[in-house]
Image: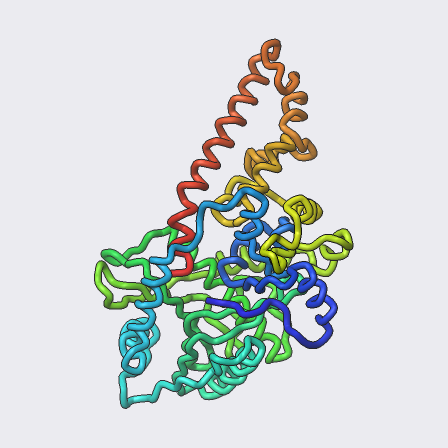
Amino acid sequence: MNVSTNVPPRGPAEPLARRLAELRGPAPQRSLNARSLAALAANPGCHRRAVLDAAGVDKSALAARLGRPAPFGQSPFAIARGVIFESRLKADGYAPLLEPLRHHLGVPVDGHAPLLVPDLLHRSGPAVRADRTAEALVRAAADPEAWTLLDHPMLRLEVAGSTAYLEPDALVVHGGRCTVVEIKSFPVLDGSADPAKVGAAARQAAVYVLALQHAAAAAAGQPLAEDPYTEQRLPGSPRTGVLLVCPKDFGNRPTAVAVDVRRELATTRRQLSRMTGIGRLLEALPPDADFDLASDEAGAPARSTGRLAASVEAVPAAYSPDCLSTCELGFHCRAQARCGDRVEQLGRGVRGELGSIRTVADALAAAGTKSGDLDGADDAAERLAYAAALRAEALETAALRTAAPAAAEAGA
């Protein structure tokens, strides 16, 4: 599920692409993927993450330069385990992978109907691969009797005026429709898997389904259905049920779990549509803002920490405690929220309930007391301050507990 670039290098997006490249500087471009898009969809009001992701900035390196690195990341052991498991599934002409696909999708046994596996030009650039995938998908959908397996196809998805290239593990095309197949290394024990891991995988798969829905609607010359729960039965359109292929019990034998992602699809579609266009966000930035993380010839940073911090501050964030487990800049934004005494540090629920009240001091004042002067406050104000502190501590503790395992297994 890797992405090689976020913005196509041609067409009307050239000025936008140039501006994003200027913000990033000469540092290597980081790629959007389904996991990062799912995180964006969970917090669509965060302009900071939207700009940094569109520009391909390494947020982990940026957080480290700002002095508040994120203490989580994808485990190298989980990555290695996932690579080994997927390579075993695709050995012997995909024979191990076809076993669970036959059970759930009805893929015929050898000799009854050949399984077509077109060449998707994996060594080419993302734009070329996306075009090749679109052509292969059209050909496969045109023959309702054929069975086609697209191994690591490349999909396009427009997000807030920027193009993301997404790479699911596989697509199975039959009967003019396609099914997303995601390969995960977490086990299915006694017929069930960890709900948190399945939920994370479902949110990622929903991004692929959304990209395929857009592609099918565009190819048919029709608009995307307004109701996100409606399946448009167009040539090449995806089914909203995806397959997660995982190890069975404690061995390496694969099994498949069917997951309905309609709810995740509706949420992702709604949240991504709420995001402000990248072009509008860039217009609000100061001309000298950039996130250049490169070093000069002497090895010193090209941009000072103060200048990087000022550029980050120029892009509004929408912090909440769950950002600690989903965004590399979560700890930096938490420190900002604390220094500014902002109510965001207490969670989205409290932030929404307080309406136009933006700081904890204002909330306490509204309750009849002043922040830092609780000796003469009434019981209600004391309880408010104490409950707010407990809530903030509980939310942050829960986020930290889930950060490491969630990040380790999300892309495995």
Residue occupying the point 78% across, 55% down? 287
- Up the image or down, 319 lies above or below 7; here it is above
Q: Position of residue 251 (x, y in %)?
A: 21, 63
Q: Nearer the viewer, residue 132 or 18?
A: 18
Q: Nearer the viewer, residue 74 or 349?
A: 74
Residue occupying the point 56% across, 57% down? 58
Q: Quadrant of residue 217?
A: bottom right
Indicate left or right for 410 with 34 as reference.
Answer: left
How many tags in the picture?
Answer: 0
Q: Position of residue 302 (x, y in %)?
A: 65, 55
Indicate left or right for 162 with 208 as reference.
Answer: right
- Up the image or down, 49 lies above or below 390; here it is below
Q: Quadrant of the C terminus?
A: bottom left
Q: Residue furthest top?
A: 376
Q: How is the image coloured?
A: rainbow
Residue 334 seen in this snapshot: yes
Residue occupying the point 49% across, 59% down? 35
Indicate left or right for 246 with 241 as reference.
Answer: left
Indicate left or right for 405 with 346 as reference.
Answer: left
Residue 235 seen in this snapshot: no
Q: Quadrant of residue 157?
A: bottom right
Residue occupying the point 58% across, 56% down? 299
Q: Quadrant of residue 10?
A: bottom right
Q: Position of residue 329 (x, y in %)?
A: 56, 47
- Up the image or down, 286 lies above or below 21; here it is above
Q: Residue furthest front?
A: 298
